[in-house]
Amino acid sequence: MRGLAVPLGVLALVWSYLLAATPLYRRLERKYQVLSSPLPALANERGPWPAAPGPRAKAAIVMLARNSDVDDVIHTLRTFEPTFNGRYRYPYVFLNDKPWSLAFRSRIVASLTKIRGAEPGAPPPDVRFGLIPTEHWSYPPHVDQAKARRCMQEMQRAGVPYAAKESYHHMCRFQSGFFFKHELLAEFDWYWRLEPDVDYFCPLHYDPFQLLVARNASYGFNILAPEFMDTIPSLSTTLESYMSAHNIPTPPPTLQLMWDNQTDTYNGLHFWSNFEIASLRWLRSAEYAKFFKFLDQTGNFYYERWGDAPVHSVAAGMLLAPHQVHYFEDVGYRHGDRVHCPAAKEKKGVYGPCGCDLEEIKSRRVWWGKWVYKDRWRNELERWRAWAAVWQKI
């Protein structure tokens, strides 16, 4: 039987290849493996890398994750380290509403060490693991929990994504108003938000933190998307109430780019906060605290399903001037079915040229065709590109 091992192995490989090529298999794969993503070409352990020259900002790379996310977190690090942080080496801060397991912490440190190819005797990667305070991940006193759970069930029946997941509501509120207060971030002025299971495609030739500092900007994004409006049915009227209470007669200039002038309402467009680079000082400011408190008092992080992406976006729209918001067009990025590829790919970064091919990603890496990529989204994105051409050089 030993002599048949190789032929049988070959037959198995051929059979799996033919099976994968069939339309039925592809349909099943798309249905049940929506977020499968092969690693980009740059994702390999190729260190050690020399530190990039120049000063560093007081900044951290921040990820909210669970112990069970460890494989997806490592996937992210294998794309983020080669494109940026392998050379810039900003600290990582991992936050969790449950205590971190020893297995998670050990695997993350070991993975980073392997990716960077650290030489013997080199200091370990700067990785910090924090527990979210209970008061930042629970119902606030002003929320009627019984009403909230009834609303969640009603939203679930109406097809609102994640509506019945209580922890998801806690997460949205935490990311909107509390993560920047965590003790592990107290020493930092800037953060770059990472998520489990994302891809970075394009090596950066500069430090985005230093760019924001130089431009006196406070918020950076690279994907714009329309919100599922059933998650935020009252957000627009709440914004109008805020403007009325603070004698703001019309939407400020940045918010106007997210405003429907025909209906005089917030149109749901938002910066997709799964990628954002922003000022922690701004988020800790009195003006942001006042704005968040006004939103939070409605209880609609629970009675509705307000997400941190529209909240961060309307906060930037309300409180920041256009030149304080930066469009990172040259950052190639994927999370779930949302992808951004830079228009220009010939610009070489610290590790080489950009390898972001939108058509290849559409065909191989994501489940394409969801509502986020409808024509309206593309038309609105062109508006933002025109805006960026006025307010920044890209």
Image (cartoon, helix red, strand yellow):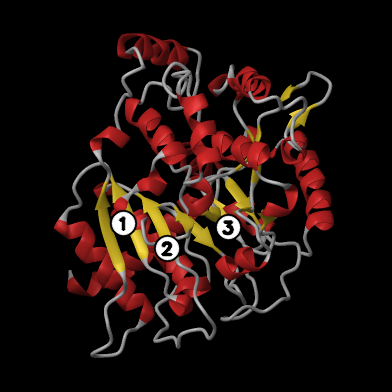
Q: Quadrant of the C terminus?
A: bottom right
Tag 2–tag 1 contact (CB < 8 Å): yes
Query: Hey, which residue is sitting farthest left in the picture?
Result: 102
71 vs 205: above or below = above
250 vs 202: above or below = above
3D distance between C-alphas at marks 2 and 1: 10 Å
Tag 2–tag 3 contact (CB < 8 Å): no
Residue located 44% across and 43% down the image: 33
List the residue tagged with mark 3: 333
Kind of residue at disc 1: Leu
Q: Earlier in the sequence, mark 1 or mark 3?
A: 1
Kind of residue at disc 2: Ala
Callout 3: SS = strand
Residue 65 location (% of width, % of height): 33, 48
Callout 1: SS = helix
On residue 184, the disc is 1
Q: Residues within 10 Å of mark 3 (few under 14, many from 20)?
A: many
Residue 42 visible here: no
3D distance between C-alphas at marks 1 and 3: 26 Å
User: Which picture quadrant has residue 372?
Assistant: top right
Between 320 and 338, the residue placed more toward the observer is: 320
Q: Residues within 10 Å of mark 2 (few under 14, many from 20)?
A: many
User: Which picture quadrant has residue 145?
Assistant: top left
Q: Earlier in the sequence, mark 2 or mark 1?
A: 2
112 relative to 356 in the view: left or right = left
> Which numbered mark, 1 or 3, is in the foreground of this view?
1
List the residue tagged with mark 2: 60
Residue 274 location (% of width, % of height): 51, 47
Kind of residue at disc 3: Tyr
Residue located 26% across and 69% down the image: 109
